[in-house]
Image (cartoon, rainbow, N blue to C red):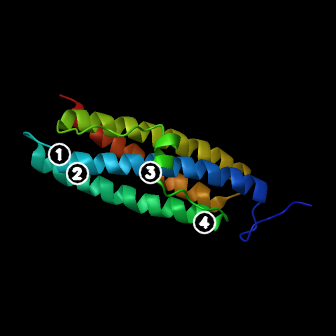
Amino acid sequence: MKKVNAIGLDTKKSEGLAAQLNELLANYSIFYQNVRGYHWNIKGEKFFELHVKFEELYNDLLLKIDEIAERILTLGYAPNHNYSEYKKASVIKESVQVSDGIKAVDDILSSFKVVITKQRELLNLSADANDEGTNALMSDYIREQEKLVWMYSAFLKK
């Protein structure tokens, strides 16, 4: 007989989802801290514009970090919370101090590519597990972030 968790999902599939969500959490956490650094250290002609955009982005990333951690808990598992673990699990690497706006936006676009790809993988896993909660969360993130990729990419075009 199949074991199910408190929300009626297969425990084995939920365990796999939680592990993948923890990887996503690690990437979001490094992404978040990188954007904080861009916000703090940005200089140059586009300072005022980028300073505000980076603040909007890191605030949004912080909300998503919390939602992902809470989803892991909802599935019955513990979210990782150590930066040492995040650094090991994250595809996104810590940026060194970046004060150039073009470089920062380019790094942001690379980070979005990583998280969107991971979220698409989670869509497949959550569909297989009949986990509509995770599926809806990932779908919402992807839709929103694809638009941000378009906007940040437009900033880089001359």
Q: Compute the Cα span from label 2 to label 4.
A: 31 Å
Identity of the residue drawn at 50% across and 52% down: 25
Q: Residue furthest top?
A: 158
Q: Please determine whether, in this image, residue 96 is positioned above or below residue 24.
A: above
Identity of the residue drawn at 8% across and 39% down: 44
Residue in front for this viewpoint, 148 or 36: 36
Q: Compute the Cα span from label 1 to label 4.
A: 34 Å
Q: Position of residue 79 (x, y in %)?
A: 56, 59
Q: Compute the Cα span from label 3 to label 2.
A: 25 Å
Say which label, 2 or 4, has the lower sequence index: 2
> The disc labelled 2 sits on which kind of residue?
Lys
Say which label, 2 or 1, has the lower sequence index: 1
- In this view, the mark in front (3 or 2): 3
SS at mark 3? helix
SS at mark 1? helix
Left/right of residue 22 with respect to residue 55 in the rendered view: right
The N terminus lies in which quarter of the figure?
bottom right
Label 2 sits on residue: 53
Label 1 sits on residue: 41
Label 4 sits on residue: 73
> The disc labelled 1 sits on which kind of residue?
Asn
Q: Is residue 56 visible?
A: yes
Q: Please determine whether, in this image, residue 12 is positioned above or below residue 154.
A: below
Identity of the residue drawn at 52% across and 59% down: 68
Say which label, 4 or 3, has the lower sequence index: 4
